[in-house]
C-alpha cells in the first residue's frame, strides 16, 4: 500500500444535474499515484431506476447528449448493476491501493461529481479526502491569464466516463509539466537572490 496520496480520477454521467433527484448512469474511475501514473481503471453502467429514466426522458439536452455518445443505447441494451454494487467495486479498488483517504480528482469533480458522490455513495465518500484535485480550476485560471488553452483535449469530450477521465489526465499531465518547469525557474531565481 502506498504511503503517498492515491488519486481517484472520477467521472459520472448522470440523468440530469440534481443529485437529490437524478441518478448516475455511468461511473468511471482511474486510480493514479501522485505522479499521475495509472495504477488501475474501472467503469460500469448503472441502473438509473424508473425515476432516473423518467428524469432523463424529460430533459431534451441530456437525452440528446446521451444519445449522441451511445450511452442511451447501452443503458437500454442490457441488465445493469445497482449503484450500491458499483460503489462496492470502486471502494474495493481504492482499498487495494491505500488504506488512507484518497484524493478525488478530475474535471468538475468539486462542483458536480462530488455532489452525487456525497448524496448517493456514502461508502465511497468515507474513503475520500476532504479536498479535491480539480483540473478544471487550473484550466479556467490558465485561460483567464493567457487567453488560450494549454491543451485542447477537453474541447470534444464524448461524455462517456472513462474516455472523459483519460482526457482530464492528458490535461493534468500537461499542467504538471508546465508547473514543474516553472517551479525549477522560480527555485533557481530564489537561490540566486539568496546567494547575492
Image: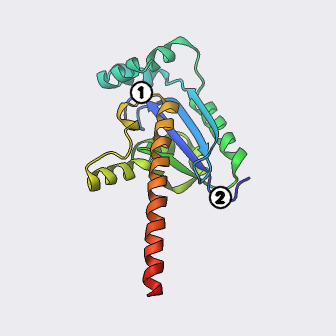
Q: Residue furthest bottom?
A: 196
Residue at the spot x=59%, y=53% of the render?
Answer: 35
Q: Is residue 4 above or below residue 192?
A: above
Residue 141: x and y, percent? 32, 54
Q: Quadrant of residue 81?
A: top right
**Nearer to us in this view, 41 or 25:** 41
The secondary element bearing badge 1 is classed as loop
Residue at the spot x=46%, y=20% of the render?
Answer: 71
Q: Is residue 151 above or below residue 23?
A: below
The residue indicated by pointer 2 is 4
Q: Is residue 93 above or below residue 163?
A: below
Q: Residue furthest top?
A: 77
Residue 115: x and y, percent? 44, 44
Q: Would you say 121 lies left or right of 61 here?
A: right
**Nearer to us in this view, 108 or 52:** 108
Quarter of the picture containing the C terminus is bottom left
**Residue 158 has which mark?**
1
Residue at the spot x=65%, y=37% of the render?
Answer: 88
In this orientation, does residue 57 appear?
yes
**Residue 66 has which mark?**
none
**Nearer to us in this view, 83 or 38:** 38
Residue at the spot x=45%, y=18% of the render?
Answer: 70
Query: Label 1 crowding class (10 Å Cα cut-off): few <14, some 14-19, many 20+?
Result: some
Residue 146: x and y, percent? 28, 53
What's the image's color scheme? Answer: rainbow
Q: Is residue 77 above or below residue 16?
A: above
Considering only order in the chain, which callout, 2 or 1, is on the residue closer to the N terminus?
2
In this orientation, does residue 18 appear?
no
Amino acid at each position: 500500500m502506498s504511503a503517498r496520496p492515491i488519486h481517484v480520477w472520477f467521472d459520472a454521467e448522470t440523468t440530469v444535474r440534481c443529485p437529490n433527484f437524478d441518478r448516475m448512469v455511468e461511473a468511471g474511475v482511474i486510480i493514479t499515484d501522485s505522479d499521475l501514473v495509472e495504477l488501475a481503471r474501472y467503469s460500469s453502467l448503472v441502473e438509473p431506476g424508473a425515476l432516473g429514466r423518467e428524469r432523463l426522458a424529460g430533459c431534451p439536452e441530456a437525452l440528446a447528449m446521451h444519445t449522441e455518445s451511445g450511452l442511451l443505447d447501452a443503458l437500454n441494451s442490457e441488465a445493469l448493476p445497482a449503484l450500491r454494487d458499483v460503489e462496492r467495486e470502486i471502494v474495493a479498488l481504492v482499498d487495494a491501493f491505500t488504506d488512507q483517504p484518497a484524493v478525488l480528482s478530475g474535471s468538475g469533480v468539486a462542483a458536480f461529481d462530488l455532489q452525487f458522490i456525497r448524496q448517493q455513495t456514502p461508502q465511497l465518500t468515507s474513503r475520500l479526502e476532504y479536498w479535491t484535485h480539480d483540473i478544471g480550476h487550473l484550466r479556467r485560471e490558465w485561460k483567464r491569464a493567457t487567453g488560450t488553452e494549454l491543451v485542447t483535449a477537453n474541447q470534444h469530450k464524448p461524455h462517456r466516463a472513462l474516455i472523459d477521465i483519460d482526457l482530464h489526465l492528458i490535461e493534468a499531465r500537461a499542467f504538471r509539466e508546465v508547473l514543474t518547469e516553472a517551479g525549477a525557474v522560480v527555485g533557481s531565481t530564489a537561490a540566486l537572490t539568496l546567494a547575492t
